[in-house]
Image (cartoon, rainbow, N blue to C red):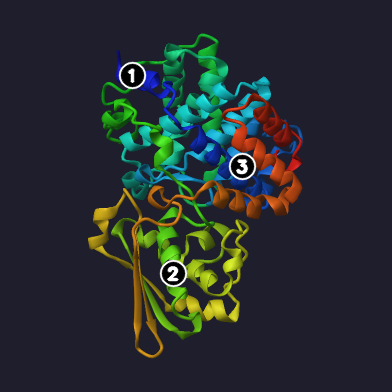
Amino acid sequence: MTDLERFADLILTPPQGAEEKLGLHLLDTLGAWLSGTRAEDSALAAKLAAPQPGLAAAFDNVLDRVAQRVAIVRCTEIDDIHMQSCTTVGSVVVPVAVTVAGALGTCDAKRFARAIATGYEAMARLSLAILGATILYRGIWPTLFSGPVGAAATAAPLLGLDASQTADAIALALALTSGAAGGGNGRFVLLGQAARAGVWAALAAAKGYRGDHALLDGDWLQRSHGIALDPAPLIAPREGEGAIAAISYKPFCAAKQNTAAIDGFRQLLGRVAADKIAAVKVSVPPAYAGMIGMRHTKGRVERILNTAYQLALVAYRPDLLDDVVRPDLSQDAKIAAFMPKVEIAADPALAAYFPAVYPARVEAKLADGETASVLVTDALGDPARTLGEAELVAKFHRLADPVIAAPNAEGLAKAALGAVSNDAALAAMLEAVAKTPALG
């Protein structure tokens, strides 16, 4: 067998005892999806979906709905993430599973759960194999690179593909990969198109198209993309629940690289008042100090990445931490005064933790000369400090209630939690999604 065939065979093997986590990540991603409909990038996607003079709409079929929905989820920065590879897996897998199952009328909860588990496993493993958390800072976005394969792997069980056909789908999807997203919000719609390509690859495999099963046995990735491949993560035996057990939830809208800093600063504010703070020093691994140390607040994405802005919100507008719209309050007197107090420092000593976790040391110097400090290695939402069902349901309501109202959100949450184990719950969830205009 080739490595790609081993990979396909392994990811199709159902994980042991993962149903609860699969349901929780499904719920969490649906919350991100609903909240994303309020963001400006969702409005852009809606414009792109409208017909152009003399041209068809950019989004006008099931594959296009995959692209639009993935873009909406990913733009939120409140979706889940696999830290070791820095890959936002749920943003691809869940919209693909929901859209394809809905289009097929598939109300087989066991098959639906298998599709989600297969997608999570495929994206996480491929991203580990290319050292996603490292190459991100070379300008290669691991989520974009692994997106076609993750989408193909998710669609495969729903389409009834066997291991050989799934290997075909993955090989075809690999040929469509690109990790070069660049800056700006165009990266979200690029990811949507990557997921669309992955579902197309699965459909092509289902119709008899073959891919190169030996694609990962040689140096193709190095020659074509300049990316070294370590095949070990692709074919390592699955342990227990598999990749789903290593996925972090985001407790608030933030790039994962500044989650620990926000978490630590919130802890400090439990001991000292914001108005008493003269300066804040946030130390992080050198790999991402520059990324979160940026000072721009001109765009929504910049306000999400900017740790100084995020800490100012923690201090004076904590109610906005969940808000993916992320309004510009940089001219607010208190926030404008607080941001210059924040320093981001690269600390080589913290590099040892990365990428297993994304740590931050937060030190506050008070006006009276006293200092307070906290080191956060495992941030809130990480596997070591995971969020339970009650916390995730509460988060879902914070995100979903403003979009579809609390009673509808309650019904959708209940259906989502049961959709991976109960056919009727899956049918109810798919019907609710189809009847929610905001979800596209």
| Location of mark 2 (residue) | 267
Q: Secondary structure at mark 2?
A: helix
At 53% across and 27% down in the image, what residue appears? Answer: 113
370 above or below 127? Answer: below
At 41% across and 62% down in the image, what residue appears? Answer: 292
**Residue 288 place in picture, x, y as percent:** 35, 57
| Location of mark 3 (residue) | 30
Amino acid type, mark 3:
Leu
Residue 39 visible in the current orientation: no
Quadrant (top left/top right/bottom left/bottom right) for the N terminus = top left
Between disc 3 and disc 2, the foreground one is 2
Q: Secondary structure at mark 1?
A: helix
Marks 3 and 2, the one that precedes in the sequence: 3
Q: Nearer the viewer, residue 110 or 76?
A: 110
**Residue 78 place in picture, x, y as percent:** 54, 51
Between disc 2 and disc 1, the foreground one is 2
At 30% across and 31% down in the image, what residue appears? Answer: 233
**Label 3 packing within 10 angstroms: few (<14), some (14-19), many (20+):** many
Marks 1 and 3, the one that precedes in the sequence: 1
Q: Nearer the viewer, residue 385 or 124?
A: 385
**Residue 123 place in picture, x, y as percent:** 42, 33
**Which label sits on residue 6?**
1
Q: Residue furthest top?
A: 208
Residue 242 visible in the current orientation: yes
